[in-house]
């Protein structure tokens, strides 16, 4: 853990000393103040990651310290300490920008558990803020950003080969961003002022494939009512992206191979040979090595496609990119509205296996934004397969996520009279438990 600077403000010297020892034992760097005025002066001199502030103090109380501290250092994560204030006062503090509160007296174990949770939350917010700057810079520039080492190596390779005409084969599971990488290569090449044409090989019927890519002349087959140029002609001097190239039939593989060897072709129904200059980027989610072995994919066609072979990792192998991607999709779908994503939501997203990869994450975030009327993405806004906040078996007529959550909280509260114990079992803070109880009228 990095040595995080912690400001502690309390007018009881004994409590200050105990907190100082507790924080120092866990590698934090605490600075203690019995005077809130002096504490605020110090906050103007150096940056504190976290602040623990007592609620009842003189000449200014904890709420006033919170307000002034947020003006001095908006990124400092503040926790209120109280032995006097009611739950309503603590909630008022949270509305004023505090992250959480802790009730005195507390044990060393309770305090350190909270301090570590606050540090985790603070670190995540700081990371996301840094990522936002990268996203702002890259959003409209066609750049791809990643914190994953393997992805960074792939992006470096992609830039290195972008200006050449060598063919590229991108492999990866569905939803890993193969087309995005293909566009990235095109945009970083000398062809970027010309067309980038996509051919979805899986979506075109075999009977129409040749006409689609090479074009046809009027009357060449039933329904050909006028001349039509194909995708390769549209992309002349640009790039062609053959998406899901593993789905191309073997007869068409032969025709595409001949085209790749010479860049020459004839429109369907025409004997005139035409020539174009295009860069080929192909992609597949299939195991091409197995397809070649089984005879489903021509080896010579494969060698023409795979001048450079790039394998994209699935999202479950690059989870450090999830906070970054969440921010990216929030900007994409809510550019005019600030959406807040709590640390607990990022944690839930990071623990999911993402079989649909980045495309699935994009859909989940888009859905959550639609549901977030209060600009806050809550765990219950996530699909059931991602957010499992309960062990209640679903009936044949499944209840809503809110009903499941409410029932689960009620069951836990029946078993645990102490709200602290209930919150611990639920895996949430006392503040969140209070909010849930108020929301569900428990």
Image (spheres, helix red, strand yellow):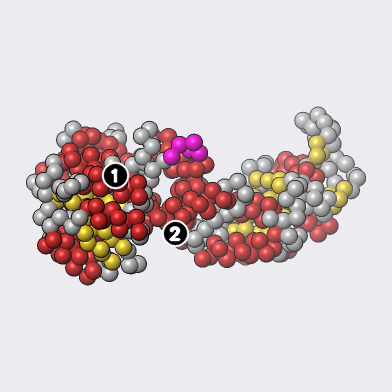
| Secondary structure of residue under mark 1 | helix
If the image is split into quadrants, where does the C terminus sit?
Answer: top left
The magenta stretch spans residue 361: no
Q: For the point 16% across and 48% down, which residue is it?
A: 58
> For residue 320, which numbered disc appears in the image?
2
Residue with the mark numbered 1: 67
> 104 and 166: which one is in front?
104
| Secondary structure of residue under mark 2 | helix
129 left or right of 271?
A: left
If the image is split into quadrants, where does the N terminus sit?
Answer: bottom left
37 left or right of 373?
A: left
Q: Is the stretch drawn in magenta largely helix, strand or loop?
A: loop
> 147 and 239: which one is in front?
147
Q: For the point 10% across and 55% down, which residue is it?
A: 105
Q: In which quarter of the image is residue 155?
A: bottom right
Please name which of the two marks, 1 or 2, marks the residue nearer to the observer. 1
Separation of marks 1 and 2 at Cα, in angstroms: 33 Å
Callout 1–callout 2 Cβ contact below 8 Å: no
Q: Which residue lies furthest to the left in this view?
A: 417
Query: Considering only order in the chain, which callout, 2 or 1, is on the residue closer to the N terminus?
Result: 1
Boundaries of the magenta span: 333-338
């Amino acid at each position: 853990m990095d040595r995080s600077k912690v400001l502690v403000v309390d007018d009881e010297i004994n409590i200050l000393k105990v907190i100082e020892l507790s924080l120092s034992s866990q590698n934090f760097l605490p600075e203690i103040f019995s005077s809130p005025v002096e504490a605020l002066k110090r906050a103007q001199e150096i940056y504190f990651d976290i602040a623990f502030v007592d609620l009842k103090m003189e000449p200014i109380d904890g709420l006033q310290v919170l307000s002034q501290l947020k003006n001095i250092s908006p990124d400092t994560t503040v926790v209120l300490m109280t032995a006097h204030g009611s739950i309503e006062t603590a909630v008022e503090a949270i509305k004023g920008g505090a992250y959480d509160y802790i009730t005195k007296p507390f044990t060393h174990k309770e305090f350190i558990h909270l301090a570590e949770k606050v540090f985790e939350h603070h670190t995540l917010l700081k990371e996301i803020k840094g990522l936002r700057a990268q996203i702002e810079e890259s959003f409209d520039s066609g750049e791809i950003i990643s914190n994953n080492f393997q992805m960074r190596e792939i992006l470096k390779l992609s830039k290195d080969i972008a200006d050449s005409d060598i063919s590229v084969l991108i492999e990866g599971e569905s939803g890993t961003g193969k087309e995005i990488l293909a566009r990235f290569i095109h945009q970083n090449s000398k062809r970027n002022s010309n067309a980038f044409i996509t051919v979805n090989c899986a979506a075109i019927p075999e009977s129409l494939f040749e006409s689609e890519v090479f074009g046809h002349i009027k009357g060449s087959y039933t329904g050909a009512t006028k001349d039509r140029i194909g995708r390769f002609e549209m992309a002349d001097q640009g790039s062609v992206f053959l998406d899901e190239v593993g789905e191309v039939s073997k007869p068409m593989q032969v025709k595409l191979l001949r085209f790749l060897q010479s860049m020459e072709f004839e429109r369907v129904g025409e004997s005139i040979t035409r020539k174009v200059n295009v860069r080929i980027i192909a992609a597949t989610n299939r195991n091409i090595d197995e397809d070649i072995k089984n005879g489903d994919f021509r080896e010579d066609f494969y060698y023409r496609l795979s001048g450079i072979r790039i394998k994209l990792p699935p999202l479950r192998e690059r989870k450090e990119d999830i906070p970054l991607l969440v921010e990216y999709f929030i900007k994409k779908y809510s550019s005019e509205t600030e959406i807040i994503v709590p640390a607990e939501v990022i944690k839930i997203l990071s623990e999911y296996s993402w079989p649909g990869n980045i495309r699935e994450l994009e859909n989940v975030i888009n859905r959550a934004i639609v549901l977030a009327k209060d600009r806050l993405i809550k765990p219950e806004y996530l699909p059931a397969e991602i957010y499992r906040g309960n062990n209640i078996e679903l009936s044949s007529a499944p209840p809503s996520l809110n009903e499941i959550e409410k029932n689960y909280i009620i069951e836990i509260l029946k078993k645990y009279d102490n709200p602290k114990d209930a919150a611990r079992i639920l895996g949430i803070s006392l503040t969140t438990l209070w909010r849930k109880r108020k929301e569900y009228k428990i």
